[in-house]
Image: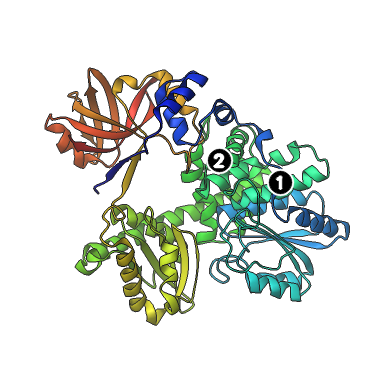
Amino acid sequence: MAYRWTPSPKLNDRKVEALATSINVSNNIATLLMQRGVATYDEAKQFFRPQLTDLHDPFLMMDMDKAIARIQAALANKERILIYGDYDVDGTTAVSTVFSFFRKLTSNIEFYIPDRYKEGYGISKIGIDYAVSTDVKLIIALDCGTRSVELIAYAKENDIDFIVCDHHLPGSEIPKAVALLNPKRKDCEYPYKELSGCGIGFKLIQAYAQLTDMPFEEITKYLDLVAVSTCSDIVDMRGENRVLVYYGLKRLNEDPCVGLQALLQSYQLKDNYEVSDIVFGIGPRINAAGRIGDAKSSVNLLIEQDFHQALKFSKTLNDNNSDRKDLDTDITREALAILEGSAHHQKRSSTVLFSEKWHKGVIGIVASRLIETYYKPTIIFSEVNGMLTGSARSVKDFDVHEAIGECGDLVEQYGGHKYAAGLTIKKENFDKFADTFDHIVGLKTNGDLNLLTPEIAYDLELDFSDITPKFYNLIQQLKPHGPGNMSPIFRTNNIKDSGNSKIVKEKHLKLGAIQKGTKFDGIGFGMSDVYEIISKNKPFDACYSIELNEYQGQTNLQLRVRDIRPV
C-alpha cells in the first residue's frame, strides 16, 4: 500500500527556542512538546510530572450535585440500585469501577450488561423491564444513555430514576434523567471533554468520596480499570486523561485489582506493562466476552476478590478471545477473497459486504482489517433476527457516521462516532443501501486521493546523528501515548544500505542503514516488498519510530520502519 507522508505543521521558531531554553532541552524535543500543546515551562512541568492534584473538581461537571444527592437518597432509603453498562471494554470497566465502589456502601446493588444479540447497544427495554421486575429504583448507566430519551422516559413511568454517565455526543433532545453527566453537553462547562465512559464513572465516585470525606486512596485503587478503559477506547491522551492513565499504569504495574492480576497472568508476565499491552492484549480479552460469549463474564472477573475464582473467569475470557481470533481470521480471509475477485468492488469508493454466516461479534474488527488492505470507508454486515446489522469503520478525515445518516430511510437505526458506527437495515435493502452509501462516499471524497490514501504523519526530520541515548530517554518521557500524543514518528532523507539489509522470515525487512556516516539497524514488519528499493544501492528516505531492541543480553536503539521510498 502506498502512503502519503505529511509533515507536522510548521511551528514558530522563536517560540520553540524559548521553550527549549526555559526547560533546558534541544529544539527537537521542544518541537515535539509544542506539537502536543505544551508551550510553557509550567505546561512542560505538568506534562512530564503529572500529579493527581491536577484532576479537575468533579462538581464542575453539569448535574454532578444532582447525581450525588440522588445516590445519597437511595443509600439512605435502602433503595435497590442497578449499575448498567455497555458490553465493550469501556462499559464493562465502568460498571466494574462504580459497582465495586458502591457495593461497599450497600447490599441493595447489582449490575446489568445488555446482550449484544438480543438487546443491542446501550439502554434496552429488556433491561428496564428487568429493573422493574427486581424492584430497582435507581439505574446508574455508564458509557451509554445520552440518546435514550424514550427509554429513560419509559423507566420514569415505571418509577425508576436514571443517572447517565456517558461520553457520546448528545442528540437534539436530552433525556429526562435525574442527572446527565456528559462533558460533551453544550451546557456543561467541565474543562475537559474527552473522558472515557469509565473516566466519567470515576468522576462520579470521586465526587461521592469528596463530599463524604473519604480518603483519596479509596478511589485511586480503581485507576487501573480507568487506564484500561481510556487506552482501549482510543480517546484523547492529553489533559486529565494523561493523568488518569499515568497513574493507572502505575497501579496496573504495582498493585492491580485481583481480576486484572489473573488476566495478566494468563496474558503475559512482564516487568512493565504499557499502553500497547492494554490495546493489544488486555483490552481484546475483556472485549471478547461480549463479542463471543456473555460480557457479564468480564465484569465478574473485574469485580472478583478471590484470586483463584478470578483465574477461572480469566480462562473464560481467554477462550472467548481465542474463538474471536479464529472467527476474525476466517471472515477476513473470506472478505478479502470477495474483494480480490471482484472488479466491481475494486472500482468503488467504499467497501460494503454481507454474509449471513458472518459472526456479528467480530464484523467491526473485520472492517478494520479490510481498511489495512483496501483503504476505504468500510461496512460489514451480518444477519441477526432477519435484519442486517452492520459495523462501519472509516479512514482519516471521513465521517462515516454522517454518511450513514445521509442514506435516509434505507437505515432503520444507527449510532456511533466519526470513525466507527453501527447500523441496522432491512435485508431486502442491502444492494440499494450499498449503492447509495457508495454514491455518498464518492461525492464526499470527490476524487480527493488524499482522503483515500493512508497517511504517515511525521513529527520531525532528523539526521541519524540526532538520535542519541539522551534523545531517546527524553522521548520516552512523552509516554503514555495515544491520540493527541502519539508515539513520535521521524523522517530521515538520503539514507543508504550499509550492506547488512536483508529479508527475514520471507516477509520482514531487516534494515542496515547509514546516513552521513552514522549507522542504525531497523526492522520493518511485513515490508519485504521495499527491499528492492534498498538493494539498488541508491539513496532512499524513511519514516520510522525509535525503539530499544534487546537481543541476547545486548540493548541498542533501532528504527521501527514505517515506510521507505526512493529519493
Horizontally, residue 353 falls left or right of residue 504, namely right
Q: Amino acid at mark 1?
A: Pro
Q: Nearer the viewer, residue 93 or 410?
A: 410
Element under disc 2: helix
Vertical relation: 70 (above or below) 251: below
Q: How is the image coloured?
A: rainbow
Horizontally, residue 521 falls left or right of residue 150, namely left
Q: Nearer the viewer, residue 209 or 466?
A: 466
Q: Which residue, as the protein is rendered here, is positioned at the far left?
A: 536
Q: What is the number of the mark on residue 58? A: 1
Element under disc 1: helix
Instruction: Please state the horizontal and vertical placement of residue 549, each as a whole percent of the image.
Output: 37, 26
Res 538 → quadrant: top left
Label 1: how many residues lie within 10 Å, few (<14), some (14-19) or many (20+)?
Answer: some
Give the labeled residue for mark 2. Answer: 264
**First-in-chain label (2 vs 1):** 1
Residue shown at 36% from the left, 62% from the top: 378
Vertical relation: 332 (above or below) 467: below
Residue shown at 63% from the left, 47% from the top: 310
Q: Amino acid at mark 2?
A: Leu
